[in-house]
Amino acid sequence: MSARRKSSWREKLENDHGLPRVCKIDPAKSPRWGTGTMAIPAPREVDALMRRVPRGKLTTIDEIRKALARRHEATVTCPLTTGIFAWIAAHAAAEAEAERQKNTTAFWRTLKAGGELNAKYPGGIALLKKRLRGEGHTIAQKGKRFFVRNYEASLAALDEGREGEPAKNAAGVC
């Protein structure tokens, strides 16, 4: 019996699993997501939008979701897969940085809703605070959580120079 090799973060980022796709929102999920369609992005799409954020600017998972919904002509984008793929992109970037690769995804510029730092990103809060402060942002602590102060003023435009084709397979149900 052979041991199965664990995939690297970069391999996980490159595996699209048949994504992106757009599906109709199931009536049982309509109370939460409304009616219409939901885009389920590919990991590389999330990474590409994260890479588009220049030094000194920021984005949030919600802004990425909005850009992906527009790209795929969907009503909403799945928050769960978008968050997971941002987390994978962050770990893939840290993996590449550890191997001294250049031009990796600046994952610290992607915040949670409300401008909150994502403690699950590589290096944790300490690294995120250091990198964000190095780009001119002010960090505030509220209880155990950390936020970029006035993050809205630094949001990057994600729709310029769109990459990828819209997913057009709205036959399935989410």
Image (cartoon, helix red, strand yellow):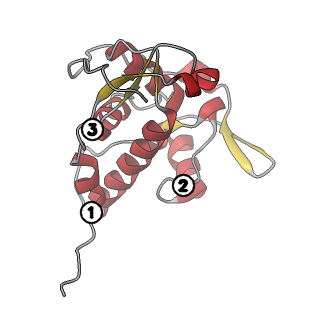
Q: Which mark sits nearer the N-terminus, 1 or 3?
A: 1
Instruction: Please tell me in which quadrant of the rendered image residue 70 appears.
Output: top left
| Disc nearer the start of the sequence (2/3) | 3
Q: Position of residue 144 (x, y in %)?
A: 76, 52
Q: Quadrant of the N terminus?
A: bottom left
Amino acid type, mark 1: Ser
Where the C terminus falls, by quadrant? top left
**Marks 2 and 3, Cα distance to the nearest angstrom?**
19 Å
Residue at the spot of label 1: 8
Which element type, helix, strand or loop, lies under badge 1?
Answer: loop
Rendered view: 46 above or below 27: below
Residue 141 vs 33, above or below: the answer is: below
- Give the residue type at disc 2: Lys
**Tag 1 and tag 2, C-beta contact below 8 Å:** no
Q: Name the residue located 57 percent from the left edge and 16 percent from the top edge.
A: 34
Is disc 1 surrounded by few (<14), some (14 to 19) or many (20+) residues within 10 Å? few
Return the disc, 1 or 2, that comes first in the chain's sequence. 1
Q: Is residue 140 above or below residue 96?
A: above
Disc 2 designates what residue?
A: 120
Determine which of the numbered discs, if any, sits on residue 119 in the image: none
Q: Which residue bears the numbered disc 3?
A: 44
Instruction: Report the side of 53 relative to 19 (left or right).
Output: right
The amino acid type of the residue labelled 3 equals Arg
Classify residue 51 by image quadrant: top left
Would residue 22 be found to the left or right of residue 5 on screen? right
Viewer-side residue, 104 vs 62 = 62
